[in-house]
Every structure is written in C-alpha cells, then in structure tokens.
Image (spheres, helix red, strand yellow):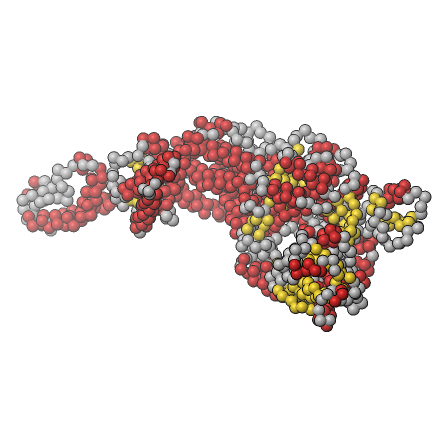
Amino acid sequence: MKIPGPLIEGFHMGKLPRFVSWFLTLLLFLFHKGRYFLWLRRLHTHGKNPHCSSMASSDSNKEQVPSTTEDPEKKRKKEEKAREKQLKKEKFLQKQAERQQQAQQSSNASKKSEKKVVKRGVEDENPEDYVDPQTTSGEKKQMSRQMAKQYSPANVEKSWYEWWEKSGFFVADASSSKPPFVIVLPPPNVTGALHIGHALTAAIEDTMIRWRRMSGDNVLWVPGMDHAGIATQVVVEKKIMRERKLTRHDLGRENFVSEVWEWKNKYGGTILQQLRRLGASLDWSRECFTMDDKRSKAVTEAFVRLYEQGLIYRDLRLVNWDCVLRTAVSDIEVDYIDINEKKKLGIPGYDEQVEFGVLTKFAYPLEDNLGEIVVATTRIETMLGDTAIAVHPDDDRYRHLHGKYAIHPFNGRKIQIICDAILVKPEFGTGAVKITPAHDPNDFEVGKRKELEFINVFTDDGKINSNGGCSEFLGMPRFKAREAIKLALKNKGLYRGSENNVMRLGVCSRSNDIIEPMIKPQWYVNCNDLAKQALHVEENRNLEFIPKQYSDEWKRWLENIRDWCVSRQLWWGHQIPAWYVTLEDDVLKEFGAYSDHWVVGRNEEEARNEASKRYDGKKFHLAQDPDVLDTWFSSGLFPLSVLGWPDDTQDLKTFYPTSVLETGHDILFFWVARMVMLGLKLGGDVPFRKVYLHPMIRDAHGRKMSKSLGNVIDPIEVINGISLEGLHKRLEAGNLDPTELAKALEGQKKDFPNGIEECGADALRFALVSYTAQSDKINLDIQRVVGYRQWCNKLWNAIRFAMSKLGDDYIPPLNLIPNVLPFSCQWILSVLNKTISKTVMSLESFEFSKATTAVYSWWQYQLCDVFIEVIKPYFTGNDPKFASERRFAQDTLWFCLDNGLRLLHPFMPFVTEELWQRLPLARECKRAESIMICEYPSSMESWNNERVENEMDLIESAVKSLRSLAKERRDRRPAFVLCRTQEIREIINNHQQEIITLANLSSLTVITENDAVPSGYADVVVNESLSVYLELQGTNSAEVELGRIKKIDELKKQIERLEKIMNAAGYEEKVSSDIRAKNQEKLDSLKERLLLEETAGLNL
C-alpha cells in the first residue's frame, strides 16, 4: 500500500498559472501540520518509511539494543519541525519583501520616514535657529536661520514696513520718464481711527499701487488728512467742557482754534500710523493736511477765482440747521429715522423725551366772521412763522375762500389763503396746508413762487425769537414751545385733535440733534454750468465709472443738481475770504444788513483795495465773514492741491490728472462730483480718468455696522486679535446708554463668542479685496478672514517644503526649457502662465475679486494640492532613475515660487516679502532688494501647453473619483482604471505614477472593456471613456451602491422629464429645430450616462 507523503507526488507547480500555484501552496501550508501527523501514524502502523533506504528497512528487523544515539523518530520529528519552521520563515520573508517593495513606491512611507527623521533630529535642534534676531527700526529685517514651523502674522509682519519706507521704495519721481500712475487717498478725518471702510479702501488702492509699481510705472499714492470741520470742533468742544467746564465761546475764537491745533498735532496722526500697519505703501514725503499752508492757499485761490467768474454768490436760502452745533450741515451729515407711529426720542438739551410721528390739527379763524379753516402739521411750533394757507384751486370746499385771510391766533397777523396746485393734495389731511416759508423746504418754494414773507422764528440755538410775535413763547426751546402752543390752542378752542403720522425725521450724525430747516444768508456755488461740463466728459468717455451702473446715477444727479451751500457757522476750518463793508453813511449798521456790501480777496489787503475801488472816496469798515467753508470744498480741491496747485509745480505737470479715484459709492455726489466740477474749472481737465466705487461693508448678517448693535469691526483688532472681554471693554468705554450697551454686549457674545483670532494684515487685506465682487454691499464674515490666515500657513509650509528639497547649495537657473521637463513640471508652468494672464487681465479691468480667485486657486489647488504632491516621490531616497526629474522639479519649483510670490505680493505684501527673501538667488542675476520693486510676472508663450493641461485634467478627474470612493480613509488600496478608447488608455498608462501618488493607491492596473474586473471593487464613471475601480473595505460597498442607485434614479427622472416635453402635443410645430436638436442631444447623452451607470458595477 502506498502511503502519501506530505507533498503530492508528480505535482508540478510551474505548470499552473501563477496565482493558482500561490493559492494551492497556501492551502498545503495551512493543512501541512495535520497531514504530517496523519502520515506518521500510517508509517507506524505499516512499519515502513517509503523515503528510507533498503538498509534502513532491514535494520529495522534486527534486535534493538539500547543505545545512547538519538531515537530516529524523535530525530525525524525534529527535522520535520525544522522544515516546517523553515517554510514559515521563507513565507514570512517573502511577504516582508513584498511589503518593503510596496513601501518604496508609497508616498505614505516617505512621509513616515520623514517624520521619523524629524523626530530623531529634534534633539539636535537649536530653538534659537527659529527665532528672528532683533532688527533695528528702519533696517532690513533680520530673519531666523530656520523657518519657523508655523506661520505667525505678528512675527512675519514686523520690521518690513519701516525698511520699505526708509529705503524710499514708496517715493515717486516727478522727473521720471516712466508712465505715471497716480491715486490720491481719500483723506480720512483727522479725528478718526481706522475703521473697516478705511481698511477696504487702503487694501484695494495698495493692490493697484503695488501692481503698477512692479509693472514699471512711476507710481504716486498721496496720503493726506481732512480737517473735518464739524467732527473735530465737536471733539475739542467736548474735551474742554469735560476738563475745564468751558464752552468755545468762553475761550473765544482765537484761543479755541489754538486748542484745536494743539489737539490735532497730539492726536491727529493716529490713522496714518494705522495705515502703515495695514501695509499701505503711500508716498509719505508728500503727506498733506487740508488746512496746512499750501492747501489753505489753494482753497482761498479757488474761492476768489470762482467768485470773480460769477460762480460764487451770497443768498438767503433754507439750510439744514443744527441747533446744538449752531451751524448749517451738509446732506451727508444728516441721517434719517423712519417713524411709523407716535414715538418718543431723547433730544440733546432736553430732560424729557420728545414725541414725534404725530399729526396735529388746529383751526385758523377767518376774517369777517367767515368761520375757520383747519390745517394739520407735525411741527406745530413753526405756526408762529406761518405767512399763508394753501389750498388746491380745484377743491370746491375752499373755492369761496380764495384770496381771503385768516387771523393768526397769537399775534394777529393776517394770513392769506392762496391756491397752489403743485404743493397741495386735496385728499391729504384737511386739504388746507399751512405755509412756513422760512422753516420748510416745500413751503420755501411756495414762498418764492407766491412772493410770500419769510419769517424765521428760531434763534441759532433753537429757541423762539421775537419774530414769533408772542411774548408768551419768547426764549422757549422749540420742542417745549411745541407743547405750550398745543395747550394754548386748546385754551382758545382751536385745537382739533391729533393722529399717528408716518414720517422721516432728519438727525445730525454729529450731534444727534433734530435738523431744523432754517433760512440763513449763506455763500453758494452756482453748479449749473459746472454740472453740464461734468456730464459732458462722462458722455465723451473721458471719465469712466466702475461699476458702470453708477453712470446712470451720476447723470440723474447732475441733471437735477442744486446750488451748493459752502458756508458753515464754525470756527475750525478755512475762514471764508469775504469781507463785509460797513459804510460810514449806512443807515443799518448790523453786520450783513446789506447783501451788496461784500468784497472778496485773497487777503484783507486785496479786499480793502476792492472796497476802495467800489466805494471811492467813502469811509468804511471791513469785517471778515466769521463763517468757514464747507469741508467738502477743500476736499473737492484735493487732487489739485496735493500736487501743488495753484502753483505750476513739477508734480502738477507730471501727475495731473491722476489715474484712478477709488472710494465708496455713498459719496459719489458729495465728493466725486465736486472734484470733477472743480477740477475741470480750475485744473482744465478731469481730476482722474477712472472712478472705482467699492461696496459698503455690513456685518455677516447684512446689518449696517453700529456701536449700539455691537457689530462694529476694528481692523486693528482683526489684525492683532482680541478677546471677547477686550471687545466688551471697548464698548463699555463708549457713551452708549445702559439699554443699548446691554444689547451691544449680547450682540458681541453671539457674533464673537471667543473674541477675534489674530489674523494679520495680509489675511485681512486679501479677504477685503476678495469681497469686492459683492455689488454694492459686503457682508463681512470674520471667519473668512480667519480662513485666509490659515491659508497663509499653507503658503508658509509650501516654502518650508521647497527649502528642504532645494537644499542650501541650490542655485536656480536663469530660465527653463519647458519641452525637456517632466510632465508635471510642464503642466504647472502652463497653468501658472494662465493664472498670470487672468490676474493681470482682472487687475486691468478692476475685477479685483477675480484676481484674488485666480491667484488663490493656483497656489491652493494646483501648486500645493497637485504639483508639490506629485513631485514628492522624486525626493524619496536617492533613486538614480529620478535624478534628472529631481533636478527639473527643483528648478520648476523655484520658478513657481518666485513667480507665485510676486504674483501674490500686491494682495499680501508682508508674507510674500518674507518668503521671497528666503528663496535662493538665481545664477548670475542681481536680485532686487525687495519683492515690491521686482518685475510683476508676465505670461510666457513658451510655457503654454494645452495638451498637457488636458491630460492633467483627465488625471485629476480620475483622482477625484478615486478619492470620492475612498471617502475619508487614507489607507492605500489597489485600483483599476477602465479605459474605453486607445487615446485615454495611452494617457493613463503614461501617468500611472501621478495617479498612484495623488490618489494614494497601492497599485494601479489599466484595463479595457475586454478585461475582467475582480469583484469587491467600488466604481465611478468618470466620463464616457473612463471608469475607475477601488478595492472595497468595510461598509464602503453599501455606501457606494446607495450612491449609484440615487444617481440612476436622478438620471431616470431627467430622462422622463425631457421625454415628456419632447412627446407633448405640438412639440414639433411650436419648438424651433435648433432647440429640438439640442433636446435630442441632451436626451441621448442622459441615456448613455444611464447605461454606463447601470452597467458600472458588473464584471465585464
């Protein structure tokens, strides 16, 4: 009987397919031990070993004698165990060898290896190597020997600005032959600190300035400050009242103005220092102030010239009057409160709140005992100045009263009943309207049309004056008089009740006082001809608005422009260069009594000479107008005055007109229009060729930023970071009342529960510029700024990686020859080239958000996510087969970083300067001192490669699909790629290394439709020519199948919808042939995709 041994006799493993032989060997190994013992038992039973020699067999029949030699059976057991052990060892070694081979191809293994090296090197690190040495202010920054392991905004952004400024990089040269590019910074108020609107302006303008400087232009960016007449005067008045309990009138004009100058010199430069912190590369050598000597000279000259040309005149007109500040204020300084019903408000100077939103009715007695006429008003206190009652000429109720008179109940004045079809609406109220020409804009126009008397019944501080004609109310504050008059009307039996009234209430943004329309003699600029010129240059495209939507608003406003009141009853500002002449023989000696007694001059001597000519031989006295000019007058001259006008300076010749005005659309008319009108008239040309109007910033919820909401964002707090407690302290230090403070504190807790993280100037700038695509409003979310700060860390790590791979001795070449480079290098240069073109094109068209998107996408998604990952295998070990690729990758990486940092610099000046300074210097090349004076990248025709980009698009699509199958798991698994065309198969075969690296695969097999796909693989259809398969693990298969079912259902629904449309009655007749063809094409495509999805999971 033949007893089988541990192996099958006559079995030749080499004759079977390799995977079959592996499988059988595994089975034999698993059952080897059990079969071995079975074989021994059979051997013992038959007393025979087929593997022993005949001598051994015969010896077994001899008499056995005890011996010291080893028992053969024990020996055999030992030998079998040894063979079994050896077999296990060989299989273990075989598996280890396979694992090591896979590990060498694995990017994960390289990462682990690098981490181990880093950990082993920690003990050898010197912490001081990662710390920047101390840098003397103004000197070039001393950087640490080793790059810090994490980006720190505070460390990166220190020292660079002082060096840039001291090195003169910001200074423009008026004698340069380079093309000029000029921006005048909208002058911030001297009282202000940097707010988020200033930060947006500075970020956008500095982006343009740095880009143009790097592009070779002669760049000038002029800084300046506005004296901010009302705002500054209010601040200093509050200061002296708080510290000394004095008013400005107690000090007198001269002493008060001295106090303001002292305050300005001590505190006025805060915002300019904050602009430096933001990185604004302004030419500080040309810094100016709207009230310095040169600008004051320009203001005086402008007023005199406009007066001599008949464009400035003095007139008695209605103005927005602030009774607290005792001055007229401009429209931009008036905020409006919408009131829908009775509402009480706190008013400065009143102990009790005042009620608004009430329409009060009262009766005027008619003469000749004709009865009464009832009128209604929201400001009953102004009835003391009524000079007429208007009715509609077609209102039958009052036809019998035309031309009759009512009698004023408090002063007996006769009040005519007039007809006015323009003002009166019979259906509103009683159909009869009281007319107070001196205290209402509509009534003022009626007064001019009907030649009515204008009676001002208020003093400058808002009290009833003697013109009111009733001693009962004389000296009474206007809102107290309101209640007193109502009570007096009741006592006279003339009160007819009240009702809720919807209204808009004007409030001064400086004092919170209720604006009082009041008639005052003021200086005005005649704007009719000036506006026509401004319209003409826009229509002839000598002036361009961006976005274009504001052109229509520009036209609408200029076509309906009103004359500009330039008088302000303040002490801080440019005193109007006009003198009132009081003649010795004048009957009325009061200042300003005669409207034709005014002379204008550059100084008192000129005014005296003019008066002498006009009043030849007469004795007179001169007194300068105490009023000052509207702040917008000096601001309107700014593009001229900052360049030296009215003097014929070299700056004016070289840099006027300026290139771009960048500002908020909210001051399009208050400032932009006035600059254009004055520039054309006094400078002979528009002050700028283009106007870019940025959006207004709101909070993340779209609300206007307000201290009372607690949502005001301080740019410096975003740059440096601040705790919630710090935010609270800033609010508590303000002047909010307890109710508003509680609301604001709660708002801060909700929006900034952990305070604001330190973001740095670069991240803030980039975020603000990226937001500019949002039309007319920006909803600023601080988390977006935080995201860009984290992105800076990615840039930092990209340079750290590069420095580790370039090495200390690396010297970059002067240029690259793309067609000899590896595929990935050709690709990154080609997409970099496109990014450069997109960025420059976007900057030229003022599409700043598109520029940031282009730069960000290249750095994030192409350089960091793809190129750096793809080239990592070249630097794993010192495999000689990657020697040339390694060198090419180093050169390409350096070129990418150099161009990429220069491309990004205008948006993020600090981090790009720091990182660029760390890059190795190219061979035989003298590098610029700073990145900011380097050449801005320009596209290279030789870098374009559409074929390579298309192939990489296919690779990225495959990788994206494989990653979607892998979900969040990062373990390396085998994959298959099914190619349905020869062209696709060649591309995938040529780029297996890139796919394996980017998709984190253990292996990749390329198959065709004729090949079988093993079961246990999830798949995705990439496109009609390509599908990918990834080995399943765990519950992944169920998730994939569920996703496939959903996709199939959606495709079926789309097909059903489209077929329903195409099968509808009249489809062929009603739908054009082009649309029918497109629908058929779409249907065919959907059906093809459905077929691919339904068959995707099957073994082919």
The residue nearer to you, when weighing 871 against 1079, is 1079
Question: Residue 289 appears at what percent x and percent y?
Answer: 74, 45
User: In this orientation, does residue 420 appear?
Assistant: yes
Question: Residue 810 appears at what percent x and percent y?
Answer: 51, 33
Residue 586 against residue 243 in the figure, above or below: above
**Displayed quadrant of residue 914:** top right
**Residue lying farthest to the bottom in this orientation:** 491
Quadrant including the C terminus? top left
Residue 265 against residue 989 in the figure, above or below: below
User: In this orientation, does residue 327 appear?
Assistant: no
The residue nearer to you, when weighing 697 against 159, is 697
The residue nearer to you, when weighing 698 against 918, is 698
Say which residue appears at 83% left-offset and 49% top-offset.
595
Question: Residue 101 appears at what percent x and percent y?
Answer: 33, 39
The residue nearer to you, when weighing 982 against 357, is 357
Say which residue appears at 65% left-offset and 48% top-offset.
274
Question: Residue 181 appears at what percent x and percent y?
Answer: 65, 35
Q: Is 603 left or right of 726, judged from the image as shown? A: right
Quadrant including the N terminus? top left
Q: Is 224 left or right of 119, judged from the image as shown? A: right
Say which residue appears at 43% left-offset and 46% top-offset.
116
In this figure, what is the number of numbered marks?
Answer: 0
Residue 666 against residue 437 in the figure, above or below: above
Q: Is 25 left or right of 624, judged from the image as shown? A: left
Q: Is 632 left or right of 1027, judged from the image as shown? A: right
Say which residue appears at 36% left-offset and 32% top-offset.
987
